């Protein structure tokens, strides 16, 4: 099967030769890590199967959060933890999108603008929800930043999993209708104003076309039941970029073909781009070092966990037990580790015996 690493190994050197002087260190690191992932360059271990009398090499993973072959274990553990945080209530999936006019500024100031995007969206939602005409209490928000479309184009937006109710100032739980959270237009106006204020404070407003402050901003809100399926949807993207190796179709004559689902028609389509363009599209979604793409607000904020426990206590014990049981049942089983006790022969299924560690041959970037 074609892998992202195959494309990087074959066309990465030419990409570096052409753009290396302008590449960010984080992009260089991601390119190199994915090329070397699970190869002899990173070292590993040599195992032996007594049943088949065969040896098996198990190479180390790169552990880069943008690698499509890494992060499965972390995603599984993250999913279990998030589903344990879910309250026994209905949830909404709210998406805030950064307008096209602001994307050049975001590309040049990623850490600042991405943080502003997440913070402004959360503050807008929390502020409007405090209005007694809507929720009249404090929501719980889990936010995950995405920067891509399914075709790997640059499209910064943040997804929030939002409780369908909130904790009031006097310690009562107020639920909302299962199909309505807040009105979209005032939410978009508050969000737009907070982004504008944030860019003004950062001294970046002069780089933005003023017409963007007069247009309607896009916010999408939909009911998602108990929220467990939405957590499962987001989990794979927390520890890697949108593209998985399964979506790669072909690499031929310096062109890469990959498949994606069209957002409008929901049909599976294919895109064919040069290897250089493909690498460029992928690398533009590599996040700044140390940037936290998953954040918690409102009741889910670490400083508000006592209030979260209070909200959980106010909801029915029976519903809580059902939600926790459902979370445990729907969470995928952890992947087997690479230890000698659990690693098994791919041919006969017998446990493998560790013979020796393999030294890394890679050099630092």
Image: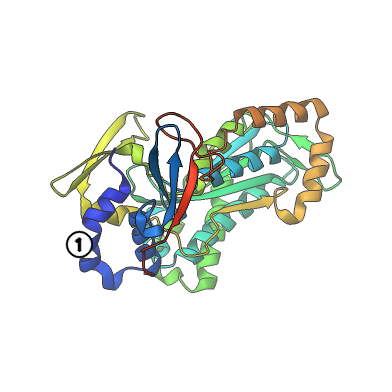
Q: Secondary structure at mark 1?
A: helix
Determine the residue positioned at 35% across, 37% down. Answer: 246
Residue 61 coordinates in the image, percent (x, y): 44, 52
Judge whether 262 appears above or below 170 on screen. Answer: above
Residue in the foreground of this view, choosing between 280 and 262: 280
Task: Kindly tell me whether residue 97 is visible in this rendering.
Answer: no
Q: Is residue 170 left or right of residue 120?
A: right
Determine the residue positioned at 57% across, 59% down. Answer: 194
Quarter assignment of residue 331:
top right
Residue 304 coordinates in the image, percent (x, y): 76, 52
* Quarter the C terminus occupies: bottom left
Residue 57 coordinates in the image, percent (x, y): 39, 47
Count neighbours of disc 1 (C-alpha within 10 A) and say few if under 14, some if 14 to 19, many if 20 or more.
Answer: some
Quarter assignment of residue 321:
top right
Residue in the foreground of this view, choosing between 300 and 248: 248
Residue in the foreground of this view, choosing between 43 and 257: 43
Pick out the residue farthest to the right. Answer: 170
Reading the image, the residue beneath label 1 is: 14
Determine the residue positioned at 62% across, 48% down. Answer: 125
* Quarter the N terminus occupies: top left
Q: Is residue 284 left or right of residue 274?
A: right
Residue in the foreground of this view, choosing between 295 and 341: 341
Task: Kindly tell me whether residue 48 is visible in this rendering.
Answer: yes
Residue 287 coordinates in the image, percent (x, y): 45, 59
Judge whether 352 appears above or below 301 on screen. Answer: above
């Amino acid at each position: 099967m074609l892998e992202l690493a195959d494309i990087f190994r074959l066309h990465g050197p030419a990409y570096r030769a052409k753009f290396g002087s302008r590449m960010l260190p984080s992009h260089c690191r991601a390119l190199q890590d994915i090329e070397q992932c699970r190869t002899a360059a990173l070292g590993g271990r040599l195992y032996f199967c007594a049943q088949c009398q065969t040896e098996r090499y198990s190479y180390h993973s790169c552990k880069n959060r943008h690698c499509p072959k890494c992060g499965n274990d972390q995603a599984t553990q993250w999913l279990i933890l998030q589903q344990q945080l879910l309250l026994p209530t209905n949830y909404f999936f709210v998406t805030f999108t950064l307008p096209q006019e602001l994307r050049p500024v975001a590309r040049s100031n990623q850490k600042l603008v991405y943080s502003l995007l997440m913070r402004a969206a959360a503050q807008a939602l929390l502020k409007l929800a405090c209005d007694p005409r809507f929720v009249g209490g404090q929501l719980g928000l889990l936010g995950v930043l995405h920067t891509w479309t399914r075709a790997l184009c640059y499209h910064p937006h943040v997804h929030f999993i939002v409780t369908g109710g909130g904790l009031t100032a006097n310690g009562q739980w107020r639920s909302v209708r299962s199909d309505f959270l807040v009105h979209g237009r005032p939410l978009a106006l508050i969000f737009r104003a907070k982004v504008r204020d944030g860019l003004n404070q950062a001294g970046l407003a002069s780089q933005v076309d003023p017409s963007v402050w007069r247009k309607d901003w896009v916010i999408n809100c939909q009911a998602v039941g108990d929220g467990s399926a939405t957590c499962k949807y987001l989990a794979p993207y927390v520890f890697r970029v949108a593209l998985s190796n399964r979506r790669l179709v072909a690499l031929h004559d310096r062109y890469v073909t990959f498949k994606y689902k069209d957002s409008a028609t929901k049909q599976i389509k294919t895109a064919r781009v040069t290897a250089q363009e493909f690498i460029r599209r992928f690398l533009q979604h590599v996040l700044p070092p140390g940037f936290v793409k998953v954040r918690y607000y409102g009741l889910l904020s670490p400083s508000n966990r006592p209030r979260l426990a209070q909200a959980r206590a106010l909801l029915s014990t029976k519903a809580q037990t059902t939600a926790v049981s459902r979370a445990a049942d729907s969470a995928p089983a952890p992947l087997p580790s690479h230890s000698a006790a659990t690693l098994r022969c791919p041919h006969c299924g017998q446990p493998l015996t560790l013979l020796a560690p393999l030294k890394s041959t890679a050099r630092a970037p």
